[in-house]
């Protein structure tokens, strides 16, 4: 099995609703996202999937978050039935969005995990263990 990991960064603001601490106030982070995919078959070039293609898939999602107030995006907007924009929920959102893109691309890889770092020492990881 081969594993590839790419890393992207974005800057965005959020606030946590229903949380009794300072993260309930509007504040921002420079988030780091790591996405890992896996697969068994390499193409004729010896690649599982071109890093460029994988980065483009993740950038399509990350660009929605970048320089935005995450709470106002539909998926995280309480007024529209959204969920709290915690690092955990952002990780699962990116995971599911990238998985959908991979499925639509027909590439023979599957997403393994998404890690979302909201600071150099705080990270949430989402994976769907079978
Ligand atoms: Zn925060």
Image (cartoon, helix red, strand yellow):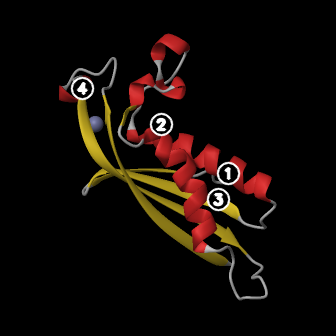
Q: Calculate the distance from the C-alpha at mark 1 to the C-alpha at mark 2.
A: 15 Å
> Which residue lies under the disc numbered 4?
26
Judged from this view, the residue extending furthest toward the bottom is 45
Query: Pointers 1 and 2 in contact (CB under 8 A)?
Result: no
> Which residue lies under the disc numbered 2?
89
Disc 3 is placed on an element classified as strand
Q: Residue at x 68, y 82 (%)?
A: 47
Residue neighbourhood size for the residue with mark 3, other residues' Cα within 10 Å, grouped as few (<14), some (14–19), many (≥20): many
Which image quadrant for residue 66?
top left
> Which residue lies under the disc numbered 3?
111
Disc 4 is placed on an element classified as loop
Q: Residue at x 25, y 56 (%)?
A: 121
Judge whether 65 appears above or below 34 on screen. above
Q: Calculate the distance from the C-alpha at mark 1 to the C-alpha at mark 3.
A: 6 Å
Residue neighbourhood size for the residue with mark 4, other residues' Cα within 10 Å, grouped as few (<14), some (14–19), many (≥20): few
Sequence-first tag of 1 and 2: 2
Q: Calculate the distance from the C-alpha at mark 2 to the C-alpha at mark 3.
A: 17 Å
Which image quadrant for residue 48?
bottom right
């Amino acid at each position: 099995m081969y594993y590839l990991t790419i890393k992207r960064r974005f800057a965005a603001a959020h606030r946590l609703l229903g949380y009794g601490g300072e993260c309930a106030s509007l504040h921002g982070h420079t988030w780091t996202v790591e996405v890992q995919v896996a697969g068994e078959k390499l193409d004729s070039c010896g690649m599982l999937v071109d890093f460029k293609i994988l980065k483009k898939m993740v950038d399509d999602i990350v660009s929605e978050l970048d320089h935005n107030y995450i709470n106002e995006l539909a998926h995280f907007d309480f007024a529209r039935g959204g969920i709290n924009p915690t690092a955990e929920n952002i990780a699962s959102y990116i995971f599911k969005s990238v998985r959908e893109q991979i499925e639509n691309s027909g590439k023979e890889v599957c997403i393994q995990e998404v890690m979302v770092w909201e600071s150099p020492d705080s990270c949430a990881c989402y994976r769907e263990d079978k």
